[in-house]
Image (cartoon, rainbow, N blue to C red):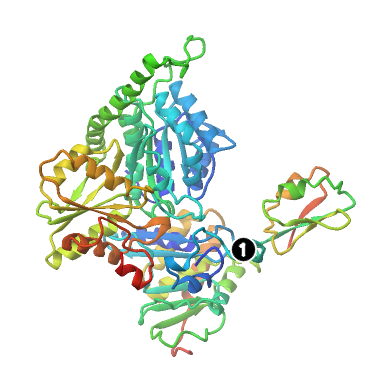
Amino acid sequence: MSPHGHDAHKATAYITEQDLPERPLATVPSDVIKTASWRTFLPVIHLEACTKCYVCWKFCPDVAIGIDEAGWPVVRLDYCKGCGICAEECKPRAIDMVKE
Amino acid sequence: MIASELLAQAAFIEGKHPQSFPFFGVERRGAPVTAFTRIADAPIPVRTSITEPDIVVVLDASLMRTIRVTAGLKKHGVLLVNSDHPVVGIDKRFEGRTATVDATGIALTQGLGTKSMPIVNTAILGALARVTGIVSLDAVVEAIVKFVPAKIEANAEAAKVAYREVQELQAVIH
Amino acid sequence: MPRMVLSGNYAQSYAAKLARVHVIAAYPITPQTAIVEKLGEFVASGELSAQFIKVESEHSALQACISAAALGARTYTATSSQGLLLMHELLHWASGARAPVVMGVVNRAVAPPWSIFTDHTDTVAQRDTGWIQFYAESNQEVLDTTLMAFRLAEHPDVLLPAMVTEDAFYLSHTVEPVDVPTQDEVDEFLPRRDVRGLIRPGAGVRLGSFTMPDLYEEFRHKIARAMERSAEVFFEIEDDYHRLTGRHHGGPLPTYRVDDADAVLMTMGTATTTARSVVDALRTRGNRVGLAKLRAFRPFPVKEVRQLAATVDRIGVLDRSFTFGAAGAAFTEVAAALYPETHRPALKNFVAGLGGRDLTPKVLEGMFKALLKGDGPEVDWPDLKRRAEVVRHG
């Protein structure tokens, strides 16, 4: 088993040193790895209380807070693990953690 | 992971030498992990991962869609699956015993965890004790009493119910 | 004496608790986190009366410990891999300030590529920092050695920091039975440190101030001498611990079935357990092989290595790390220790088990066989995944 899923080891089982690039480069961008499957609580942003300070965006340890075209923060459901840091850090308390 | 540690504690209670360890790529609640336990009468003379187990315990049967859980399992080993129906699609090369127990149902009845995240560790150990005899039910219950931090009675009951209800498949359906 | 089923990480925590540390400062990193979490629980519940200092980095953690230890407090920290590397500057500071900090290190590979699995590069790379270094084979050894490390580090003839390492996951997250000494036993073995030291507020002393070239060298030599003395002091401490607990882990280089051995493999950490089984298996098949466990890497047990080599013709040194541009560090040091000897066994370096790669009985048996045959390169990476044609060309 590898950090990239249960099947990754099958694909790499016959790779030898000669098959690897000189530098440890991953050829798959990390955002293809969806990390949201283990979420229990979902952040819900109440835009009426949001001041667009982007503290949630800044504190999110993943890439789970995006900014939409109008400048509002949005939760990117594929990446949010439900850690709750955004809700904790939100000064106007515009984010609630809601059980899914 | 908790189940493998509790199994180690139960074996220790019976005077055995356990060695139990998890393997994970990422640490996170609810993510699939594998955990291993060796149990012996004497100190265990190796520190390597386990590639050819005697027993495989599957806590989430949905993993069987993507993982060949019998990989490396000894030909005449034991496969125990948390499932409310007989499991199908087991690798043809496996000629050992297969048992199922509805650990999820038992856990929920006992109020352990939630429907989306039932806590099946203790129920599965009761079933394991019955199917393999590797530890006794008494030792499992004692380990639960000593080391489970909450809902001790419900957890002990889950193990006992699973011990009674585990079903061994008479013929393996491949 | 209670016997418990403990992980290597909890063995560290229990040792620090039984040592009644005054100050703990640490920053979490996988796979060390549980050590500090458990200590946090002990402090929160009142089972351990200690100052638990929350810090923003490993660098700060060690700085807090150095200051506390210099003032006379018994101090503990724990880290791993990148965290230890971030401490590097202060590792030198700790020994230079003669601050007897004790640190648990979970041996974890260094990035990149990123890895959380076992590898000795992190601690081996700290061999020049003036820290005493012990490598543990079992959770029992983790606990016992950590207790001994406190007494050794704080001994007035030593006053040097000490680290006790454990292989990531193979010990850190593996639970197994451990005999835990009682508080009374530990109190007898390791009395509380007298905090009324030379350095205290108002004493009018400063630590680590500017030193001109006419005296710097002398301070360095004092560290060198203290490190040498620590080897002698450790024997006394191990004997005391044995009297108290009945356990003795065999000095800095315990050996197994070496007396009539044609070839001996030297290991560090958890590879030793599996290698011991391989020795037994090979012996049943008539191969006279033995094992030596390099338990203390600093101070390096030169005398013991020489004693071992006096009766053996072939020694293999297994390094779970590599010094680029040279060879495995343990191998190089064994070779250096044996240079002045008249009987110099053939040496081979096996570099394997990096980044958590399993050191299986098969891989270890291959090392013994290569040793007995005397073939293969002097520095060998026997478990590399290579295409067959490349293997032929070595």
Residue at 48% of width from left, 14% of height from top? Answer: C206
Q: Give residue C366's quadrant in the image.
A: bottom left
Quarter containing the N terminus of chain C:
top left
Q: Residues within 10 Å of mark 1 (few under 14, many from 20)?
A: some
Q: Where is residue B112 in the image (x, y as percent from the top left)?
A: 60, 64
Q: What residue type is labelled 1?
A: Gly
Describe residue A19's horizontal placement relative to residue C188 as left or right. right
User: Eyeballing the image, is C373 above or below C206?
Assistant: below
Residue at (48, 90) in percent of width and height = B173
- On screen, residue C290 versus residue C51, left or right, reads left
Look at mark 1 in the image and give the residue it sits on: B113
User: Front-most of C74 and C320?
Assistant: C320
Residue in front for this viewpoint, B10 or A38: A38
**Which quadrant would residue A98 be assigned to in this image?**
bottom right
In this rendering, the answer to whether C236 lies above or below C287 is above
Q: Which of A6 and C365 is in front in this view?
A: C365
Q: Residue at x 48, y 70 (%)?
A: A12
Which image quadrant: the C terminus of chain C? Answer: bottom left
The number of numbered discs placed on residues in the rendered structure image is: 1
Element type at mark 1: loop
Q: As drawn, is C390 to the left or to the right of A90? A: left
**Foreground residue among C393 and C33:** C393
Q: Where is residue C99 in the image (x, y as percent from the top left)?
A: 41, 26
Of all chains, the one bearing label 1 is B
Pinpoint residue C15: horizontal percent, then vertical percent.
39, 39
Q: Where is residue C228 in the image (x, y as percent from the top left)?
A: 26, 29
Among all residues in the image, which is located at the extreme front?
C393
Question: Which residue sits at x=39%, y=24%?
Answer: C98
